[in-house]
Image (tube, rainbow, N blue to C red):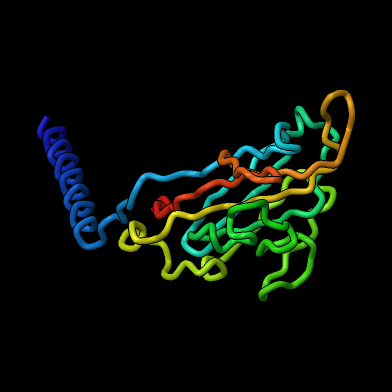
Amino acid sequence: MKAMIGHRHSTVGAAFLSTLIVASLLLLFPMKAHSAPCGTTILDLTAGQTIPVGSVTVSNDANNIYVTYAIDTVNQTSATFGTLHLWIGDDLTKVDNGGITRPAPGKLSFISDGTVRGGYSFPSSAGSTSYTFTIPFSAINVTGVPSSTTCLNLPALYVVAHAEVKNVFSSNSYKDQTAFGGPTPVAGSAWWFYGQYTICCDFGG
């Protein structure tokens, strides 16, 4: 019986010691707090003004913004991308045509055709059904690395995402269409949409 009591005391003592060690480590090396709840933004990709063809998904880490174009391959079984054009910034008036009328796709900042523009080059997206742009924050003039101390001071971003989409099915026929991502329509002689994105500073650690 004495041996059993002694064993019990040693077990309780070991558990207490382990708890004390963990608590001490947390004081010395506190866990990194999440700065703010945030998540991925998904924009509808609309072709021909009214035809849903896929999505544009925007996310970020501490260094880059990621913009993924994806065809809805369930409902658009034959559709593929041609060239993709992308602009991101905190001031919509700086996009081609000042954000008043549809910007010329070829004048958007990032283009998936393998050509070097402004020091950046993106491989061709032709024939793909999913494609991701990786854009450094420095390329869109966002100063400072997103963190818990800077996140509230970082600007909200506008996203102008254009796509050439081949073989879009609509009204019992297949046609090549132009498409834009986003929920916000812009009035003018030619239709287009844009979206908005709030920079995320919660990197999960």
**Residue placed most toward the observer, 34 or 11:** 34
Residue 134 can be seen in this image: no
Disc count in the image?
Answer: 0
Residue 77, image x, y percentages: 82, 31
View extreme (right): residue: 173
Residue at x-position 87% and y-position 37%: 175
Question: x and y percent of residue 134 in the render?
Answer: 62, 60
Place of residue 92 in the rendered image (x, y in percent of width and height, measured from the top left): 53, 57
Tell which of 12 and 181 is nearer to you.
181
Tell me if 101 is positioned left or right of 63 in this view. right
- Residue at 15 percent of width and 45 percent of height: 16
Left or right: 86 as drawn, with respect to 89: right
Name of the residue lying farthest toward the front: 189
How far from the left and from the top, in percent, is residue 12?
15, 40
Q: Name the quadrant of the N terminus.
A: top left
Residue at image position (81%, 41%) is 177
Judged left or right of residue 79, residue 203 is left
Specify the farthest residue to the bottom: 119
> 44 and 177: which one is in front?
177
Residue drawn at x 49%, y 49% as measured from the top left: 197
Specify whether residue 166 is in view: yes
Place residue 51 in its image quadrant.
top right
Q: Is residue 86 above or below residue 53?
A: below
Q: In this view, does 176 lie above or below 21?
A: above
